[in-house]
Amino acid sequence: MAMLHIIRSSGFTSNALTQCLNMTLPEDTILLMDDGCYNLNHPMMLEAQFKQQELAVYYISLHASARAQSSNQSSFSAIDLDDVLGLIFKHDNAITWS
Amino acid sequence: MAMLHIIRSSGFTSNALTQCLNMTLPEDTILLMDDGCYNLNHPMMLEAQFKQQELAVYYISLHASARAQSSNQSSFSAIDLDDVLGLIFKHDNAITWS
Amino acid sequence: MSEQIQTDKTIAILNTQAPFSSAAGKEALDAALIFGSFEQATSLFFMADGVFQVIGDQNAESIELKDYLKTFSALEFYDIENIYVCAQSLTERNLTANFHLDNVQVLSNEEFSQHLHAHNVIYRF
Amino acid sequence: MSEQIQTDKTIAILNTQAPFSSAAGKEALDAALIFGSFEQATSLFFMADGVFQVIGDQNAESIELKDYLKTFSALEFYDIENIYVCAQSLTERNLTANFHLDNVQVLSNEEFSQHLHAHNVIYRF
Amino acid sequence: MQNTLALVVTTPPNSNLTTTAINLVHAALNNGVKLIGVFFYQDGVLNAAKHLAIPSDEFQTLTQWQQLSSDYNVPLYLCITAAEKRGLSDELNQHELSNIDKAFTVSGLGELVELTSKAERVVQL
Amino acid sequence: MQNTLALVVTTPPNSNLTTTAINLVHAALNNGVKLIGVFFYQDGVLNAAKHLAIPSDEFQTLTQWQQLSSDYNVPLYLCITAAEKRGLSDELNQHELSNIDKAFTVSGLGELVELTSKAERVVQL
């Protein structure tokens, strides 16, 4: 089943990003929310995307800009909370990595 | 000034162990307390001790055994809370890495 | 509220924290037991520092903590039989497969992930 | 309690957490300002995710948060002039030396550690 | 058919993570998703604390939950076991003495089982 | 001359980290160290919650603090700003309505400045 991984913490402080990336399968989606947006330029995020090109990565635009974070990865998509609801129902299940 | 570093969290989950080891100077002391005892066998702890042989490392015996943790490093000393008071006053200052 | 909830959902309780310093492990187990008592198909997963919850020879009472780890034995009573532990997390922590509960299945990262994906709802603690 | 506390102690407030998701940054700043108002020699340190507190172009209000980062400007008023940022933490996070406060000193790991060691009391947030 | 969603909130009221949860509730309401309930567990139970004193120029978490309950009939379920371990109590002599806000329904973990079973999707925040 | 110590407690009452803090206080008393005060800040303020309901077979954090205050005259200072953001209040009409236990002295951060200045050593737990 395709899983939505909601990351809400910084991978520089917490192990949750590593845990998440150990669990992703190709059809899964990663959503960076809140402090999860600090991972936009985390080496592990970039490596994960490089290794699993099919892995979709989204981030909440407002949460990233509030933190002065941005991405130059064209494959990372900026979305809003309305879009998150679409993602929740499009996927079979979800894990929140806080 | 000689500093006492009190580590109370697992370096496998939190970045605090890394932060601490980035800040230690040779005359400092590391004290593993509570979940800090999970670091007894953490590769970074072993490496730090190997690199800075002068660095003193203590751990609360009761906190380690409660967690089924032990060390085979002869240079890591098991102590109790009474000994901690001695360490607090022997050092000039302290940081708690929770 | 009835003890007869009609559902074919599978529930995963994913443990990622060590047992003593936070309430997470106990609150995860409380949730698992309630799901079990309502006859929901529930599985327990342990990864990262969560594996410290299942290793043997711990002694919570020596640090003045009520030993909630003993409550794990109630899982069997509620037919919660799927208990999965991540092998990589054990290895990283220099831990052997010495557990205080029975029926533990140690899985590779891939197997662990696939089992997790097979559940409808995942609560992470 | 008097505003004239006799002491020659130096106080370090060490920030290690990002600004918005926990109260830590704000409570650290509250403490720093009180120490300053009692004319205690106080320094601010930022390392690890704490460096996210000092970078420029943040917009707390856009996520419905009162911008406590603006309160940093009060530090000057209390003669808190030592503001140290860890260079390695900036580099690891792909951040440039673009700060929302003045007088920031970016230090190498070694210098940062030595300054920290020179304080009598260190509170970590 | 209308999509149904349940949320589990585990973050305290003074965190911006809770603001995000509230905003996601609004997004659900605006997008025709039926929110069948919000369950407060772990540190999330502190959201039900009646006497929260947050400065008037900061985000009023409690007011927001109250409005979601009164204006949009979003059911708010408080896990009383988790709440009692964090200083909340509904067993005080009179209703006026309770420190739980009345927008919240005092519940047990059984309510989480119900919500999990009934909602098409569950998200933990 | 007697060594003097001040402690800053930042961990909540349902954490074993707080048990360690209490045990360190006892160790200080047993070793002739003068504990000039314990300051409760950040999530540590929850230790002062009067209505904590912890099962009788679990560690009674509040009872322990009360005894340290009554039997050993250890001063317990509560940071009221941090407390009010976490649901505690001393501004209720009558003393009986307050949800702060009376073993704790309601204080501001100025008390932390005093303790920091007076104690030979300060430890944050």
Image: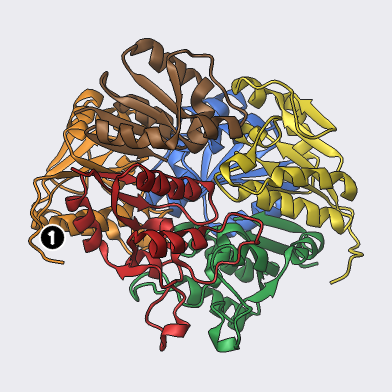
Chain colours: A brown, B blue, C orange, D yellow, E red, F green
| Subunit that carries the residue with mark 1 | C
Crowding around mark 1 (Cα neighbors within 10 Å: few <14, some 14 to 19, many 20+) is some
Instruction: Tell whether E117 sits left or right of C66.
Output: left
Q: Circle 1 sits in a helix, a strand or a loop, which is it?
A: helix
Q: Nearer the viewer, residue F46 or A28?
A: A28
- Image coords of residue E19 (percent x, y): 50, 49
Q: Nearer the viewer, residue A22 or E13?
A: E13
Coordinates of residue B8 in the picture (x, y in percent): 52, 47
Q: Going by the image, does A37 lie left or right of D45?
A: left
Residue B85 appears in the figure: yes
Res B82 quadrant in image? bottom right
Residue at image position (26%, 36%) is A89
Q: Is residue E125 visible?
A: no
In the figure, residue C103 lies in which quadrant?
top left
Check the image and report above or below for D115 versus C3.
above
* Residue positioned 17% across, 55% down in the render: C35
Residue at point 65%, 49% (across, down): D66
**Residue that mark 1 sits on:** C37
* Closer-to-camera residue (A31/F112): A31
Q: Amino acid at mark 1?
A: Ser
Front residue of F2/C59: it is: C59
